[in-house]
Amino acid sequence: PHMNSYLDTLRFLASELPFAMRVIAANVWLFGPLLRYIVLQKNKTAALVRTTTAVTVVNAGEKINAIPGSATALINHRIHPLDSPETILRYNRKVISDPRVKLTRYNSYPGSDRNNYTPVSP
């Protein structure tokens, strides 16, 4: 289900694709895992099938020769419709695996709460 919009686009563009990609796009029931692998190889298409992450702000020390006592970072997640902020936080905690690191959920704009999510439809 999470690849439906990507597949709709792929079908629309199918006549412009190389033969091998047309075969894959026409037989997702068989080549679904291969298609996912191909999509995940490029940052531009990976966002269609998974949550993306970008470090956008980092603050730490002020001197070149001194180790800062603390640091902060703001991480932007573009959350895929099948994920949730809670699953992303759990994943981040698992990957960071350091109890000294404090993670806080920050809503950057009104209505960014997952409960207010409205899917976009054509």
Image (cartoon, helix red, strand yellow):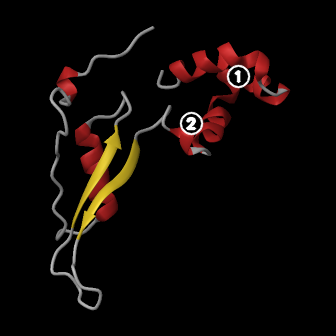
The circle on residue 107 is none
Task: Tell me residue 45's x, y (percent).
Answer: 56, 36
Considering every residue shown, the one lying at the far front of the view is 63
Q: Secondary structure at mark 1?
A: helix
Q: Residue at x 25, y 48 (%)?
A: 89
Q: Secondary structure at mark 2?
A: helix
Which residue, given by chain and number where applicable, does mark 1 sit on?
25
Instruction: Give the CA separation, mark 2 to mark 1.
Output: 15 Å
Q: Residue at x 24, y 39 (%)?
A: 85
Crowding at dot 1, Cα within 10 Å, few <14 / some 14-19 / many 20+, comes out as: many
Q: Quadrant of residue 115?
A: top left
Which residue, given by chain and number where applicable, does mark 2 sit on?
45
Q: Is residue 11 above or below residue 34?
A: above
Q: Residue at x 19, y 66 (%)?
A: 101
Q: Is residue 97 above or below residue 6?
A: below
Task: Tell me residue 118's x, y (percent).
Answer: 28, 17
Q: Residue at x 40, y 39 (%)?
A: 51
Q: State which tag comes first along the sequence, 2 or 1.
A: 1
Q: Is residue 97 above or below residue 93?
A: below
Q: Would residue 17 be found to the left or right of residue 4 on screen? A: right
Residues at marks 2 and 1 touching, judged by CB atoms closer than 8 Å: no
Task: Tell me residue 4's x, y (percent).
Answer: 52, 19
Q: Quadrant of residue 7?
A: top right
